[in-house]
Amino acid sequence: MRPEKKKEDERQRIPTGMFDAGQSRSTHLKLSLFGLCIIVLVGIAGYRAIEHWSLLDSLFMTIITLTTVGYGEVNPLSPAGRIFTVVLITLGVGFVAYTIGSLTHWMVETQLRHILGRRRLQKQIEKLEGHYIVCGFGRMGTTICEGMINKKVPVIVIEKEGEVLEKIISSDEYLYIQGDATDDETLLAAGIRRAQGLIAVAASDTANVYITLTARQLNPELFILSRAEDDSAGRKLKQAGATRVISPYQIGARRMLMAIIRPAVIDFLDAAMFEDIDLQMEEHLVNEQSNLSGKSLRESNIRKVHGLSVVAIKRRGGKMLFNPPADTVIENGDKLITIGPLASLEELDKWMD
């Protein structure tokens, strides 16, 4: 059964208007700082031209004039220098005050946006149920998360500090937890006891083993998918409690072999599983309330009514029946592997419920 779809706006952590206001405030601050620099340069140039002071004296006189700290004059001022100082104070002091106010406002607003964003993010995470937790946002983690977002599958990313975390935050597409996925508190904050599954794709096999072990202790019923670089790590992950272990190198090698031996089969599977065409493969869980429970494939009329082909049935115990005959009885807990148009797959999901 396809996981429950979530609305697109549930993944947004902060209202768009708050970002717009922050960007506007940042623009004002930049303009204020730019204007302040111009006034300082004008002050330096004015004292050098009128009083013929050194660069350091001109800079010092400009700063104490704009900040009104009350120091005495660097050197005696001529009448023209005093008039210039009056003009500099009149134009500059107000501008300095405005710049300081803009800077303060920007700092407070930035901190407030961060606090509100974290609170809103945590509230959304606390409301999630049946979601997936992805530990690690490297190349594999990024691809997995993108696919889940496209399929409207709720997902939470766990990542430590660094450029990767900044990438997650700046993308504004994912719910995330900042922390170590091997820590109990981090996994609990990600709602592991309400989650449907966890995917361990950290950078090392050691980290994936610790993540798997911790996750299994916190949720004994959790589906855990983990990546392994070699066979020994795969065995350790199984012992730690991984439901399924994937070795990217083995899968890649097998696909390359199939691409040589049976290229048409690979093209068909890629089109059915990953490409945006009106032909998909899907699995459907049969529960006790399902209309299909206890019926044979012939009696279910899946092909006749919905135009779908049942290519396999996975029994509750894990046995896989490929190309099952028409008299095969559908049992509670079975997973039907079907292929057909996307609209028909969705209709079958609704009809089974």
Image (cartoon, rainbow, N blue to C red):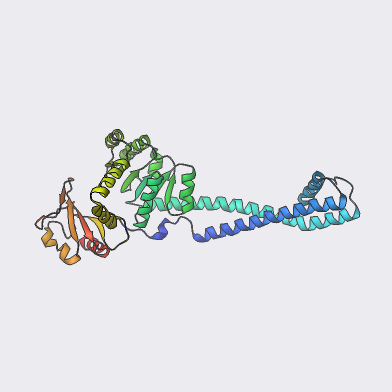
Residue at x 49%, y 44% (from the top left corner): 163
Task: Tell me if I can see residue 288 in this picture.
Answer: no
Task: Tell me if I can see residue 64 in this picture.
Answer: yes
The answer to which image quadrant residue 239 occupies is top left
Closer to the camera in the image, 1 or 126: 1
The answer to which image quadrant residue 204 occupies is top left
Closer to the camera in the image, 218 or 228: 228
Quadrant, the N terminus: bottom left
Q: Position of residue 153 (x, y in %)?
A: 34, 54
Q: Position of residue 46 (x, y in %)?
A: 82, 53
308 to 51, vertically: above or below = below
232 to 299, vertically: above or below = above
Q: Position of residue 34 (x, y in %)?
A: 68, 55
Residue at x 85%, y 52% (from the top left corner): 49
Quadrant, the C terminus: bottom left
Q: Is residue 67 left or right of residue 299?
A: right
Residue at x 30%, y 39% (from the top left corner): 216
